[in-house]
Image: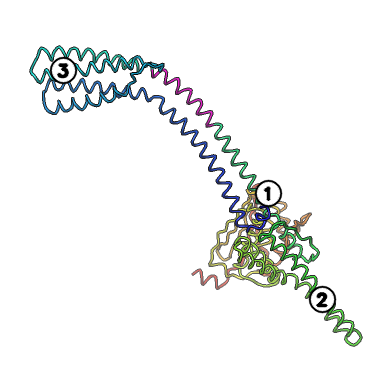
Amino acid sequence: MLSKLRSLPLSYKISGIYILANLFIFIVDILLLWGINSMSVDMEMTYQDNRHLNELLLSLDSVQDAMTGYLNAKTTDSLSDYYISEQHYSELVNELGTEITDRPYGRMERNIKNMSADYLDDVSKTIEAKRGRNVEKYRVHYEDATRLYEYIKTYIRSLNSEQFVTNSQMYTSLARSFRIFEFFAIIIMFAVLVGSALIIIRITGALIDPLKQLSESADEVANGNLDATLPKSTYDDEIGKLTSAFGKMMVSIKEYIERIRMSMEKERIMQEKELMMETHLKDAQLKYLQAQINPHFLFNTLNAGAQLAMMEGADRTYEYVQTVADFFRYNVKKQDEMVNLEEEVELVDNYIRILNVRFSGDIHYEKQVDERLLKVRMPSMILQPIVENAVNHGIREMGDKGHIFLRVYRDLDRICVSVRDNGKGMSSEDIDKVVGGKWKYEEQVGDSNGIGMDNVIARLRLYCERDDVINIYSEGEDLGTEVIIYLPLTDEVIKKDV
């Protein structure tokens, strides 16, 4: 069973964790809602007896009024009103209890029911006497019915008052119990949510850790360390296969380099006496090849891993590996080239995606770009070091509260590219040092590409042929920092804007 779980695709594992967590929360919600609904029904039924007595009292008044109305008018409509009200009152009276039990106020309900039967009988006789034009008889029955009407009305009001007092006490007790249950329900829901979040973080962390380790190893290899420690994956999913493929790739790289080195060494020895100068040239070419083959072989292997992830349906793994390959390829190919602003923005997008995979999406990234300005030319590797600086020295310790906002806009005769964060902020002294090229960080952050702000500013000034190419703004400590670089507005951009 455990081996089957280890071999499941990564998408199945993550989906399973999500479904189980939500199912557990759903069951707890259902149980809590059931408890709340049960108590709500009990509270709603507390005054049911009072509502019934009020309705009974209104129906009694309706019968009395209908009888009086018929005696005064003696019309078909008034007689119909009497029959309707009499039928309704009879139905309500029948709902009163007649059995002798220990139920409170049962005796009063029985008395009301018995008097109501006598009252309805007198009312019926009054109506019949009136229809037979027997004035003396209907007057006697009318007086008896009216007297019973007053007795019944008094009984109903007395019973209603006593039940209201008792029901109010019961309602107060139920309301107190409901508030206690509600308090504990909130605590339980909070505990369930926190517990579920911790469990999900723990499980997904265990699944993603091998990928983080693989990414760190890939960083070391990209920096030329072919002896980097390779992560060991106990899973047979996409990450396990990618780790295994990466290990085989490293072995192949080392063997390939060794074969080239031995081949070139033999050639150098054979031609050492006759072609000394050529041998030096070959040696230089070998070093260049050794410097270049590692990243290119890594790109091809990462692309193969991405294809493998795509074929196995691991879309997020495919996207991540492809993004890493594009990021490395840009770093190697574009170091000394002129590029479009659009390429620099895409590099920042890839860089943030890679960091968010490594750090579980902690970095919130937004951008607002005027696409008409994206074709402007600029030196390569300008924006990514600025964003990297904002991450490593601004929001790195903020967890999931860190925000990076990239904005590209036009300001009169220049193009502005702003990188703003909500991190630690900078003092005015530090800002002056950075802009003046005198700032040196005491320690290099492990994720850095090695391009400092002094390098970025120097290359911008050479390209723009002016000094005011950058501004840094910060309100102070923990108030964030905004770095704005200025690029010249080209004729092509001006025509497109027009």
**Range shown magenta:** 163-182
Q: Is residue 327 left or right of residue 44?
A: right
Q: x%, y% of residue 214?
A: 72, 60
Q: Is residue 153 left or right of residue 130?
A: right
Type of secondary structure dominating the magenta stretch: helix
Circle 2 residue: 259
Disc 1 packing (10 Å; few <14; some 14–19; many ≥20): many
Residue at the extreme bottom of the image, as rendered: 274
**Label 1: which secondary element:** loop
Q: CA distance from mark 3 to mark 1?
A: 94 Å
Residue at image x 58%, y 64%? 415
Circle 1 residue: 424
Residue at image x 75%, y 70%? 294
Residue at image x 40%, y 27%? 45
User: Does residue 461 appear in this view?
Assistant: no
Residue at the extreme right of the image, as rendered: 273
Task: Name above or below for residue 460 compared with residue 421.
Answer: below
Q: Is residue 204 magenta?
A: no
Q: Amino acid at mark 1?
A: Lys
Circle 3 residue: 125
State the image quarter where residue 117 is shown.
Answer: top left
**Label 3: which secondary element:** helix
